[in-house]
Amino acid sequence: MNTSSLLAAGVAGVLALGTAQAATPEITYHYAQVDNVRVFYREAGDPKAPTIVLLHGLPTSSFMYRELIPMLADRYHVIAPDMPGFGFTEAPPRGAYAYTFAQLAQTMDRFTEVLGLKRYALQVFDYGAPVGWRLAVAHPERVTALISQNGNAYEEGLSPGWAPVKRYWNAPTPANRDALRVMLTAQDIKSQYTHGVADPLRIAPETYTLDHERVSRPGNDEIQLDLLLDYQNNVKLYPTFQQYFRTHQPPLLAVWGRNDPYFLPAGAQAWTRDLPKAEIHFYDTGHFALETHVREIGPVIHRFLDTHVARDK
């Protein structure tokens, strides 16, 4: 190859690299003052495009969506907040903020209003599910579609792993509360990521390390135990959530790690009772399915949004 050909090839390579980099949507990082809480959130995509709000679960944060966000932001406006008590959002003292799922939902509702989000799809995971279902019940006209990644709404989805938590619900004694502190240890948090995963080497260590650092902040253990106690009110609201599904028939996609130790595949399959057109996909992985299968799950979510919300604005 002569010098001219080498030069041309080099220029073409640089241009191709620049095009690839330009095609990857940039994530930016922000705070919004929502009443008495300073909420951290990640944002990507054109604000004029249809919006999707991503809600995380326990013990994680919006960091869990770091790879999914750019996969969706080529065509959608993506917003991923940290809920109070998680990630980089403020954790007000327990006396200044009620750590219940009703309060988390109220804060997230106000968050969408502060950002001026009038209509949005919701993606939920774990704790994000009962928060998202409350938003949908309160504002069915705002929610364009629902995506659940191991976010439950049916009792048959609760695994036997909930037994210690249910014991705490039935008898909220100091001993039963203390028995749940193991869920907040570094070892247990890591196991939440690795359980049911064929190859744990695919799990990035910064995931469980960051989660443990955040929940280990002074006083945060008590916040998390308050939320575990209040989770019983989510289960009590399952009939209300299911009535919303039946009445409003929102488009729903479930992308589920079938080896989840907390939320069973039966919880995803149950949607077909109330939403006959629900789209259900299972993956051979655990609770944090996006950590191992984001390349498979991301395109499925994108196609679902393209079908149901691409023309929403």
Image (spheres, helix red, strand yellow):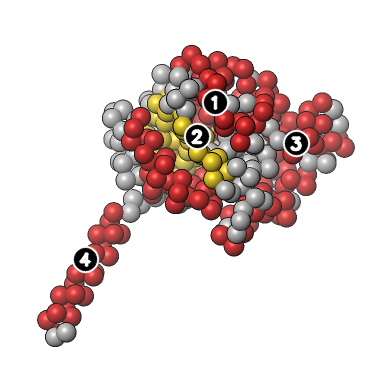
Residues at marks 1 and 4, CA–CA distance in whole angstroms: 47 Å
Q: Nearer the viewer, residue 280 or 244?
A: 280
Residue shown at the point (73%, 55%) measured from the top left: 187
Task: Report how far apart the C-alphas of labels 3 and 4 lie in the structure.
Answer: 55 Å
Going from the N terminus, do you reach mark 2 or mark 4 first? 4
Q: Secondary structure at mark 1?
A: helix
Q: Which residue is mark 4?
A: 15
Residue 43 seen in render: no
Relative to 69, 193 lies left or right = right
Q: Residues within 10 Å of mark 4 (few under 14, many from 20)?
A: few
User: Which label number is shown at residue 280?
Assistant: 2
Relative to 118, residue 84 above or below: below
- Front residue of this view, candidates 188 and 160: 160
Mark 2: amino acid: Ile
Gap in angstroms between the C-alphas marked 2 and 4: 40 Å
The residue shown at (83%, 41%) is 179
Q: Which residue is mark 1?
A: 271
